[in-house]
Image (cartoon, helix red, strand yellow):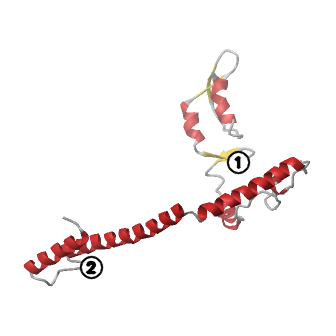
């Protein structure tokens, strides 16, 4: 029991003096509670413990660890990539030259010519021309619808270019109904 109480104290790498109260059979001392309260008065160093009142800690010993921590924090270099970061990767190394098969090369060239002809024919087709023209018309129509919608909203709210803020209530209603009729909104 006594040795299990001493193991946490000896793990501090210092020896705290204690006064045995009694001894167990076998000579193991039993520690009193007064001994543990007395232990708080001792300061430990790497070699031994001494009463804290007899050994004051100089201010230099308090500031050295703080200064070292600040030096490391302030003078550390920014993180950099590993030492291989400047070297090209494996993707830049050319692979082995594969044997060229004449039949496959001819087949590939014929297919490339065929695809180029198909693309040219499609670009000249009347269907594509019709679809492109319809797309341009739809784009202009949609742009005009969006402008009309925002003009009506601005007139109703009294903001923007289509604002009806200075009009009489009757003129305002006529103006908004005219905008809705123009836009095709009911």
Q: Residue at x 64, y 24 (%)?
A: 2
Residue with the most extreme front position: 126
Q: Foreground: 166 or 25?
A: 166
**Mark 2 = which residue?**
160
Q: Secondary structure at mark 1?
A: loop
Q: CA distance from mark 1 to mark 2?
A: 80 Å
Tell me if label 1 and label 2 are in contact, CB under 8 Å: no
Q: Position of residue 99 (x, y in %)?
A: 91, 48
Q: Earlier in the sequence, mark 1 or mark 2?
A: 1
Q: Secondary structure at mark 2?
A: loop
Label placed on residue 45: 1
Residue with the most extreme bottom position: 166
The quadrant in which residue 185 appears is bottom left
Q: Residue at x 86, y 55 (%)?
A: 93
Above-or-below relation of 33 to 80: above
Label placed on residue 162: none
Q: Foreground: 108 or 88?
A: 108
Q: How packed is label 1: few (under 14 Cα within 10 Å), some, or many (20 or more)?
A: few
Q: Position of residue 160 (x, y in %)?
A: 27, 79
Q: Foreground: 119 or 26?
A: 119
Q: Position of residue 173 (x, y in %)?
A: 12, 75
Q: Position of residue 104 (x, y in %)?
A: 84, 48
Q: How packed is label 2: few (under 14 Cα within 10 Å), some, or many (20 or more)?
A: few
Q: Residue at x 16, y 73 (%)?
A: 177
Q: Foreground: 16 or 157?
A: 157
The quarter in which the N terminus is drawn is top right
The quadrant in which residue 172 appears is bottom left
Residue 157 visible to an observer of this rendering: no
């Amino acid at each position: 029991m006594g040795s299990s109480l001493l193991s946490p104290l000896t793990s501090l790498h210092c020896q705290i003096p204690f006064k045995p109260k009694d001894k167990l059979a076998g000579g193991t001392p039993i520690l009193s509670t007064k001994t543990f309260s007395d232990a708080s008065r001792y300061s430990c160093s790497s070699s031994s413990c001494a009463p804290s009142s007899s050994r004051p800690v100089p201010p230099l010993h308090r500031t050295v660890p703080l200064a070292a921590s600040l030096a490391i924090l302030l003078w550390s270099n920014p993180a950099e990539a590993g030492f291989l970061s400047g070297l090209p990767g494996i993707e830049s190394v050319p692979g082995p030259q594969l044997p060229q098969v004449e039949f496959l090369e001819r087949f590939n060239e014929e297919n490339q010519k065929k695809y180029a002809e198909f693309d040219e024919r499609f670009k000249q087709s009347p269907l594509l021309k019709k679809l492109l023209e319809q797309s341009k018309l739809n784009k202009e129509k949609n742009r005009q619808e969006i402008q009309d919608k925002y003009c009506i909203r601005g007139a109703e709210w009294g903001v923007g270019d289509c604002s009806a803020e200075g009009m009489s209530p009757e003129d305002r209603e006529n103006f908004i109904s005219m905008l809705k009729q123009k836009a095709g909104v009911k």
